Structures are given as structure tokens and as C-alpha cells.
Image (cartoon, helix red, strand yellow):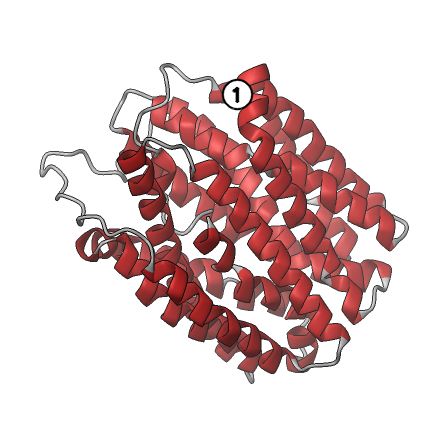
């Protein structure tokens, strides 16, 4: 749980500095949107190779090596001197993030199998707390006037030795056994049931990507917030995502997966509407909080639903789900950027409302057909927390 907490801090400190980098490079919303595509592109390109490599060297070694590479890559975007360099830097960051996060998920799953404890959802909650803390640190350093490149590098260098010490203390598990040669390809055309779950999660992850990339820009451009304040939007969002994840299992036990998803879906749509009409920064922060709570449990519920389908193995279905989830991160930010470029940032954020409505309409697809599998399916999802 501590490693999950430490991993996103450096990247979280980058998020409040996106407006500073945008201004330094002279980018409009459309140009920034294209540059920000580097992160999910790097993650998608790494997916075919990260899984086999982590399985070969083991999750603990993947975490140790991944943390070193990730700590270097996380600070590179702030050093970019032009949009092409920014895209490449974010691409490198996305590649290393997917690698270390896959190691984290596999390690957590191995701990659950070895000890009989249930830690995956709580670990993801600590990840959300970590990225919230990182964004708060980034906002604080911005308020102190420290340049983005040195601020992010400082955070990464402070976190890295602590992360290596903690990661080195993790138990060692044997590398994964090779998969069956006769296993159906995970990229075979999915069933209609799985497609419904995938479309549900697309709106959820599109919103998460939009909050990471555009929350600070929205507060600055739409509401005139100052440099030390703009990072609070994502901090509030991440805090409520963490709160929702910590309480998600309780809600699911009480109301069931479908009703829990519907309650949260209504909150997500309401939060996006609040942002669109927000007259000032406090009301916008309230909107970010409601959206965070609304999308918090969507992905874990989708993973369980996909794993319960019987048309193929759980890992195959969840692999397809992970790909669609990453596409949500890929598509959301540029769509908002293009709309903001030609209209304004409020209309850009309003693009989230229709996709969240689609997710709300598809919540019935989350009904599981059988009990959740013993192995935690979230460990099969590289690069997505």
C-alpha cells in the first residue's frame, strides 16, 4: 500500500504545472491537446511488451527497475523546449508508468494469493491519495515560485530513495508460469456483453484523463484562478476518487454493483454539469469533488463484470477492457482541447456530460453472472489504476 502511495507522487506534481509549460511553449488548447497525447500513446505502445517482461523478471524487480526509469521520465516534460519534445517526453513517461504500475498490480495480486488477504482495492485507494498529495505538493511549489522543471525533479529525487527502500522490502514471488499456447487471443473481437462494459468504462476513463490534463487549465482560463490555486481542482478530484475507492466495497455489498454504479453515475453527470455552470472557483472545486466521487468505483466494477463473463478467460476479457480504458484516456483530453480551441473551455468540459450519460445508461451491464474469481483480475490491467 505504501508503494502504491509513493508511485504517483512525482507525476501528480506535474499536473498543476501543465498551465506553466503550456504558457512557456506558447501552446493553444489544441496544440497542448496534441502534445498531451504522448502519455497515453507511450502507455499503449508499452502494453504488448510490459506484460511478458514483468512475468519474466517478477513484479518486485519490475517495481524496482521501473521506479528508477519512471523517476527520470516523470521530470522530462517540464524540460521540453518545444511541442515535439513535450510529446516525446510524455511518451517516455507513459511507457515507464505503465511498466511500474503493472508491477504494482501483479505484486498486490501475488500478496493476496500468498496471504489470503484482500488489499487490491485499498491499494488503489492509496494510489489515489498519492496522486492527490503529489498535486498538492506541485501547487505548493508553484505558489513558492519554483520553476516547474526543478520542482518536479526535486519531488522525484526525494521520493525515489524512499520508494526503492520500501520496494526492496517487498516479498519475492516466482515469475509467472507461461500461458497456454492454445489460449484465445485477447484481441479477438469481444462479445456484445463485453462491448457494453467497455463502452461504460470508456466514459469513466475519458473523464479521469480530462480531469488530469484540463482541470488546472479550466480553473485558470474559465475562472481566472491564480497559479497556486489551479492545481487544487485535480487535488480535490483525486481526494474524492480515493474516498470512493475506500468505501466502494461497502457500497457494493449493500446496494449491489449495478445500483452502486448508478448512484455514482448520477453524481458524475451532476458534477460535470456543475463545472459547466460554475460561476467561481469554490463552486468549481465542488464540481470536481462530485465528479471524483462519481467515477471512483467505475473501473473496479467494470473489471469484476468483465472477469465474470464466460466466453473466454477472465484475463483475456480484462485485457480488452484495459485497452478500451486507455483509449478513453487517449481520446478525452484532445477532444476537450479541440472544442476549447474553437469555442471555450467551458464547452470543452461540457463534452464529458454526454459520455457520462452513456456510461450511466450502460450500468446494467455490470451485473455479474457468477461470483468474482479468486485471482484478482485488476492485476491483469497494465498501466491503469
Instruction: Please state the horizontal and vertical placement of residue 212, each as a whole percent of the image.
Output: 61, 56
| Depth order, front residue of 46/131 | 131
User: Is residue 148 in view?
Assistant: yes
Instruction: Please state the horizontal and vertical placement of residue 246, each as a whole percent of the image.
Output: 57, 36
Q: Residue at 64% of width from left, 69% of height from top?
A: 18
Count every numbered label the image shows and give the total.
Answer: 1
Q: Quadrant of residue 43?
A: bottom left
| Depth order, front residue of 167/82 | 167
Instruction: Please state the horizontal and vertical placement of residue 28, each as a whole percent of the image.
Output: 68, 70
Furthest-bottom residue in this view = 81
The residue under label 1 is 257
Instruction: Please state the horizontal and vertical placement of residue 58, each as a whole percent of the image.
Output: 23, 54
Q: Residue at 25% of width from left, 28% of height from top?
A: 313
Furthest-right residue in this view = 279
Horizontal relation, residue 150 to residue 349: left or right: left
Where 362 falls versus 146 (above or below)? above
Furthest-left residue in this view = 181
Horizontal relation, residue 244 to residue 120: left or right: right
Q: Residue at 63% of width from left, 78% of height from top?
A: 148
Where 336 falls versus 323 (above or below)? below
Category of crowding for the residue at label 1, using alpha-carbon neighbours closer than 10 angstroms: few (below 14), some (14–19), many (at least 20): many
The secondary structure type at the circle numbered 1 is: helix
Horizontal relation, residue 256 to residue 380: left or right: right
Q: Quadrant of residue 138?
A: bottom right
| Depth order, front residue of 138/34 | 138
| Depth order, front residue of 44/164 | 164
User: Is residue 199 in view?
Assistant: no
Where 153 falls versus 187 (above or below)? below
Amino acid at each position: 500500500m505504501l508503494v502504491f502511495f509513493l508511485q504517483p507522487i512525482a507525476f501528480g506534481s506535474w499536473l498543476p504545472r501543465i498551465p506553466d509549460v503550456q504558457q512557456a511553449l506558447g501552446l493553444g488548447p489544441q496544440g497542448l491537446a496534441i502534445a498531451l497525447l504522448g502519455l497515453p500513446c507511450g502507455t499503449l505502445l508499452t502494453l504488448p511488451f510490459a506484460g511478458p517482461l514483468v512475468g519474466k523478471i517478477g513484479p518486485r524487480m519490475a517495481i524496482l527497475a521501473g521506479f528508477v526509469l519512471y523517476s527520470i521520465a516523470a521530470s522530462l516534460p517540464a524540460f521540453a523546449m518545444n511541442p515535439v519534445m513535450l510529446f516525446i517526453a510524455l511518451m517516455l513517461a507513459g511507457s515507464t508508468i505503465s511498466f511500474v504500475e503493472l508491477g504494482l498490480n501483479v505484486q498486490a495480486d501475488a500478496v493476496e494469493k500468498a496471504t489470503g488477504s484482500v488489499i487490491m482495492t485499498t491499494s488503489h485507494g492509496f494510489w489515489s491519495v498519492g496522486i492527490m498529495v503529489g498535486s498538492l505538493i506541485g501547487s505548493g511549489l508553484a505558489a513558492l515560485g519554483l520553476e516547474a522543471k526543478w520542482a518536479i525533479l526535486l519531488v522525484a529525487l526525494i521520493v525515489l530513495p524512499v520508494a526503492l527502500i520500501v520496494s526492496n522490502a517487498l516479498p519475492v514471488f516466482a515469475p509467472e508460469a507461461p500461458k497456454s499456447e492454445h489460449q484465445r487471443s485477447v484481441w479477438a473481437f469481444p462479445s456484445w456483453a463485453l462491448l457494453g462494459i467497455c463502452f461504460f468504462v470508456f466514459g469513466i476513463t475519458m473523464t479521469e484523463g480530462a480531469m488530469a490534463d484540463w482541470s488546472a487549465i479550466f480553473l485558470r482560463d474559465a475562472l481566472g484562478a491564480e497559479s497556486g490555486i489551479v492545481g487544487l481542482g485535480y487535488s480535490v478530484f483525486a481526494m474524492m476518487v480515493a474516498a470512493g475507492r475506500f468505501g466502494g466495497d461497502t457500497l457494493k455489498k449493500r446496494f449491489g454493483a449495478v445500483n452502486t454504479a448508478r448512484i455514482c453515475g448520477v453524481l458524475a453527470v451532476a458534477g460535470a454539469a456543475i463545472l459547466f455552470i460554475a460561476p467561481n472557483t469554490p463552486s468549481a472545486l465542488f464540481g470536481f469533488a462530485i465528479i471524483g466521487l462519481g467515477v471512483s468505483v467505475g473501473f473496479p466494477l467494470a473489471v469484476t463484470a468483465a472477469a465474470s463473463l464466460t466466453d473466454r478467460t477472465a484475463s483475456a476479457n480484462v485485457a480488452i477492457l484495459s485497452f478500451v480504458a486507455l483509449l478513453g484516456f487517449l481520446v478525452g483530453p484532445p477532444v476537450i482541447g479541440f472544442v476549447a480551441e474553437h469555442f471555450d473551455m467551458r464547452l470543452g468540459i461540457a463534452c464529458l456530460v454526454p459520455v457520462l450519460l452513456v456510461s450511466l445508461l450502460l450500468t446494467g451491464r455490470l451485473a455479474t453472472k457468477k461470483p468474482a474469481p479468486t485471482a484478482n483480475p485488476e492485476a491483469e490491467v497494465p498501466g491503469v489504476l
